[in-house]
Image: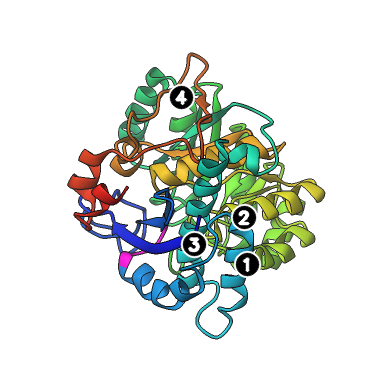
Amino acid sequence: MLITRIETCGLRGATPEGGWSNELRPDDVVHTLVAVHTDSGHVGIGSAFTTEGLVRAALELLSPQLVGQSALEAERLTETLHQSAFWMGRGGALTHATSAIDIALWDLAGQASNQPVGRLLGGRYRDRVRPYASVLMDEAPVMAENLESLVEQGFTAFKIGWWKFGRVDSATDERTVAAAREAVGERLLAVDAGGSEAFFPGGLSWARRTADMLAAYDVAWFEEALAPDDLDGFVALRAYSKVPISGGEVLTRRQTFAPFIAAGAFDIVQPDTTKGGGLSESRRIGWAAQDHGVRLVPHGWNTGVGLAADLHLASALAGTDLVEYKTGAAYIDELVAGGWTLDADGMLGVPDSAGLGISLNPDALAAYGTNPDFAVAV
């Protein structure tokens, strides 16, 4: 099974708000699908958290190292891409594009062996995973109504984030958390400050005070409380906080995560498989985290392909029992044929057919895809 070509398809028309200071618009392309074609006719699908133009540019450099190679050697191929990218932007757009390629290669390996990806990643500890409904914060009545609706839909875990949190005053912060806690009751509730926003104002003193407040509301974890590169700050915060500290969604490659894990910066590490290096890197990060008593809960504000990859990852890591579910997002809810359905316990089943175990919805691709031939190709 040799790689013959790689195609891309950006997603636009229903891009949700991200909470960013330069807020996303529906037609902004920040997620790009990748299809890896083979001479056997099999096609693997991946997803990258970056715009299609950057993925296409990355593929100009990466494709010559892939075309003609066996599609059944995901880790060798993607490690080769990482190793050869030192001079051309490793850790940025090249790594994001490599993430999609890696996911697609694991999809192909599963198709070739007629096994679900999670089993190939090392074996399945679980066949279903709890998704937490991930929503942006808002004025208390609006946010509470949204959360109550999600409770009615069957979600049993939630995360609220970004908006004004840490950006106005402590009263606004607590009022927001109090409203969310009342809306979801005793169910799991996490809080994300969104410290990766440009020029995030929150510092260590603010984070310590806020951690005390969150502990009073039995918050499951405090996410991105500081700027992403503040290693020393995260170490100090974790040592102080009664609430577990999480982060890492914008970090890429296992080598970047290593000092944070070794220093004890996080209770929960959160790589995004669609930009951190793919399933190969996320699995290695998960193994390293486990060796240091740290859990991996993947960042998943991306696409249905990313969600499928995260479900397989969670099935193959002993301590990963949650995945992020961006609610109300067409690229998650509509992109995968058949959609996603919570069971009676609020869980998502891990696909058990070959590869990622999903197929793309041609109607969604026609509505949101930038490549009109991509639907035919897959």
Viewer-side label of 4, 2: 2
Q: Which residue is mark 3?
A: 196
Q: How is the image coloured?
A: rainbow
Question: Which numbered dot is residue 155?
Answer: 4
Distance of mark 1 from mark 4, alpha carbons? 37 Å
Marks 1 & 3, CB-CB < 8 Å contact? no
Viewer-side label of 1, 4: 1
Establish if 99 lies above or below 66: above
Depth order, front residue of 170/223: 223
Number of other residues with Cα within 10 Å of mark 1, as a class: few under 14, some 14 to 19, many 20 or more = some
Q: Which residue is mark 2?
A: 280
- Tell me the residue at 65%/53% (across/down): 208
Number of other residues with Cα within 10 Å of mark 4, as a class: few under 14, some 14 to 19, many 20 or more = many
Say which amino acid is labelled 2: Ser
Viewer-side label of 1, 3: 1
Q: Which residue is mark 1?
A: 79
Say which amino acid is labelled 3: Ser
Q: Main secondary structure of the magenta part?
A: loop
Q: Secondary structure at mark 4?
A: loop
Say which amino acid is labelled 4: Phe
Distance of mark 4 from mark 2, alpha carbons? 29 Å
Marks 1 & 2, CB-CB < 8 Å contact? yes
